Amino acid sequence: MLCQDRCMPSPTPARRSRRTDALSADAIIEAAITVLDAEGEEALTFRALSTALETGPGAIYNHLANKQEILAAAAHRLVVHALADVPSDPDAENGIRAVMLAFFDLFGAHPWVGTQLSREPWQAALLEMFEAIGTHLEALGVEERYQFTAASSLLNFVLGVAGQHASATRLARDLDRSAFLRDIADGWKDEATAASHPFSRRMADQLAEHDDRQQYSDGVDFILAGIAAVTAGGGL
Amino acid sequence: MLCQDRCMPSPTPARRSRRTDALSADAIIEAAITVLDAEGEEALTFRALSTALETGPGAIYNHLANKQEILAAAAHRLVVHALADVPSDPDAENGIRAVMLAFFDLFGAHPWVGTQLSREPWQAALLEMFEAIGTHLEALGVEERYQFTAASSLLNFVLGVAGQHASATRLARDLDRSAFLRDIADGWKDEATAASHPFSRRMADQLAEHDDRQQYSDGVDFILAGIAAVTAGGGL
DNA sequence: ACACAACATGGAATGGCGTTCCATAATCAT
DNA sequence: ATGATTATGGAACGCCATTCCATGTTGTGT
């Protein structure tokens, strides 16, 4: 039916030789990070990746099962590196702030990580983050019965920020960030929107002008203060 | 080159008649929600949607620009409905807890909403959530200079939970949820993992056995306590 | 040395997706 | 009644992740 054989008489089997620089999971992940950082999440395709690695799409599957695995491994690697770079601090509260800020800075430098962390639950990267947060909470003296909830709360907060950051970056690719936020803030001032959303109307200018990192840091402080208050005050 | 015209001599232009039940953005969104709830996020394709609507993929584009717009509108509709159903409470603290729990229950009933909210920043649905949270913070007596940060913190926490919930649901489609968590907890007990992640090792059983909704509620309480402590204590 | 099993390679093929195109039909304005 | 405008929906397009497989390469046992 589809002129199957006449169209492709002989596919000319090209000469292939084994590459000298061995393909490996590590090399693939490294190339993936390079592509993701340089051209964004949607630019990571097997075609682009295999071009960067000077191979074919099929070869990649000998080392990693699928695209999700590539993304998960790439995110994991960066999380581990980010945590390794956090200087240790004798003061426990400074310690956890430093860890939380390291996450924020990681998402700033590699926005696609935020998308990835929201995609697969309790993947390896999240375990590292959970462990780091929990260790510092322990050092801070948070009682054991609150540790799980406290660590989860901080983790969920980070993940929410990460996701928003990633999608904002994806959307504001060309527009600079402040113009992008100004546009949204202006939308909040539209008569129709403002009438039904007075709170957001009042916040519009802050949305346009706020410092993301400072706001994140303040959010962390809210949660830490809450943990301190609840655990000191005798319970939830 | 590709036997272009001989293969398709005359495409037999079929008879078509205008539908009696008009296609509309509303009808499309409703059908999309039905498909998403029944078969999950990855089941929403233009082909499936147009089959459900008894039309062709092209017709949908007369009413909505693209798939993202469908998803954003569907999420927005459910968020508005969920907020409309929250009973008002004279006690401000109960009020905000009720709103936050309404979000959680929404994500439980429609996990795909969680994915969607992480995808587009400051979309309409987020505005509704931000407004609802902010209104209740105002009622709670949070000073104006803290309102933006406090509302954002709660919103980011919700979004983090939403994203995790959505991906957990996607992954645990067949497995029931507790078996899924038990698997992960068992992974945290593996000798190699446990050695480098002692905190997570200690938390493994809680991960497997915890009540998600209770933990979420406790997280909200942490943040509310933090807001109260910081605003009462004179600053960040 | 040599044969042979096992594995790595990478180009082609597959099936499915979102989106666009466009001949046709229904409707509206005149 | 007629022409302009819009809605329709099936086909086609280009891209994607993934699979297939003929071909090469490597390592092992003898």
Image (cartoon, coloured by chain):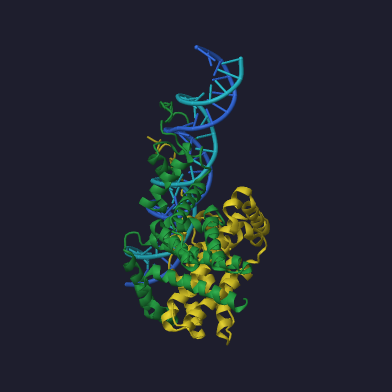
Chain colours: A green, B yellow, C blue, D cyan
Image coords of residue A63 (percent x, y): 51, 39
Asked if B231 appears above or below B176 in the picture, the reply is: below
Is residue B200 or residue B72 the one in the foreground? B200
Image coords of residue A68 (percent x, y): 51, 49
Asked if A69 appears above or below B119 in the picture, the reply is: above
Is residue A34 or residue B100 the one in the foreground? A34
Image coords of residue C10 (percent x, y): 43, 33
| The N terminus of chain B - image quarter | top left
Count every numbered label the image shows and give the total: 0
Seen at 40% across and 44% down, the residue is A48
| The C terminus of chain B - image quarter | bottom left
Image coords of residue B22 (percent x, y): 50, 66
In the image, taking residue B219 as reference, residue A193 lies left or right, namely: left
* Residue that lies at the very extreme toward the front in this rendered image: A90
Is residue A134 or residue B224 the one in the foreground? A134
Could one spot residue B61 in this view of the protein? no
Q: In which quarter of the image is residue A144?
A: bottom right
Seen at 39% across and 81% down, the residue is A202
Asked if A111 appears above or below A194 in the picture, the reply is: above
In the image, taking residue B4 as reference, residue B111 lies left or right, namely: right
Could one spot residue A99 in this view of the protein? yes
Q: In which quarter of the image is residue A121?
A: bottom right
Seen at 31% across and 63% down, the residue is A176
* Residue that lies at the very extreme toward the bottom in this rendered image: B90
